[in-house]
Amino acid sequence: MILTLIGYRGSGKSTIAPLLAQALGWEWLDADVVLEARAGRSIREIFAESGEAEFRRLERQGICEHLQRSKLVLATGGGAILNPDTRREMRAAGPVVWLKADAETLHTRITADHTTAERRPQLTATGGAAEISHLLAVREPLYRETASIVIETRGLTAAQIAEEILSRLPADFS
């Protein structure tokens, strides 16, 4: 069984995953960190040198591998839900939690994280808040389709988010 976290960049997936893993006695992975380690390059470098299509191929390959494991909390990249096969496989592997936040909250979190600019590319020509708003409009239906649990993260601490997720897992979850 896998517990998969989805949501836009800055939604808290990498922060919440270790808290959930500790509470469950499971392992956790950040799919983007594993991808970067395997590629020997940052996501920004992969985009610049090989393009988004190659990044998405590597992302899908890694997620497929991770979803074969058990007792794992998986923090995915914000765009992992773009592939319909990946969405289907996430749902089949166990509960999928969408960490939802509005564009303003995400922009505040992303700009506060100085490593984001170094490791992550802009995904539109505009970048910034306009990019977040645009991509949320595109991705929110996909997040909604994929998620079995939706957590509104605005105004909650990481511990509160983790507690809310744990309280909403199915009774037979293990």
Image (cartoon, helix red, strand yellow):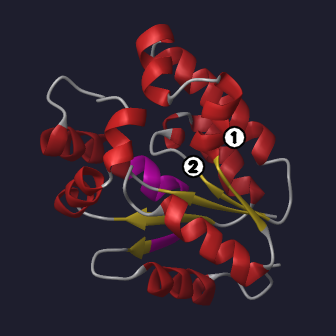
Label 2, label 1: how far apart the Cα atoms are: 8 Å
Residue 42 position, x and y percent, is: 51, 28
Badge 1 local density, few (<14 within 10 Å), some, or many (20+)?
many
Residue 144 lies within the magenta run: yes
113 is higher (above) or lower (below) than 87: below
Residue 130 lies within the magenta run: no
Q: Nearer the viewer, residue 61 or 111?
A: 111
Point 23% across, 51% down: residue? 111
Residue 133 position, x and y percent, is: 19, 46
Q: Which mark is residue 48?
A: none
Q: Is residue 133 left or right of residue 23?
A: left
Quarter holding residue 165:
bottom right
Q: Earlier in the sequence, mark 2 or mark 1?
A: 1
Q: Is residue 147 visible?
A: no
Q: Which residue is mark 2?
A: 76
Magenta stretch, main secondary structure class: helix
- What type is the residue that disc 1 sits on? Ile
Give the total of numbered labels: 2
Helix, strand or loop at label 1? It is helix
Q: Write the start and end of the magenta stretch as one range.
A: 141-150
Q: Which residue is mark 1?
A: 63
- What type is the residue that disc 2 sits on? Thr
118 is higher (above) or lower (below) than 7: above
Point 35% across, 82% down: residue? 156
The answer to whether marks 2 and 1 mark residues whose Cβ atoms lie closer than 8 Å is yes
Q: Is residue 17 left or right of residue 122?
A: right
Quarter holding residue 168:
bottom right
Quadrant in which the C terminus is drawn: bottom right
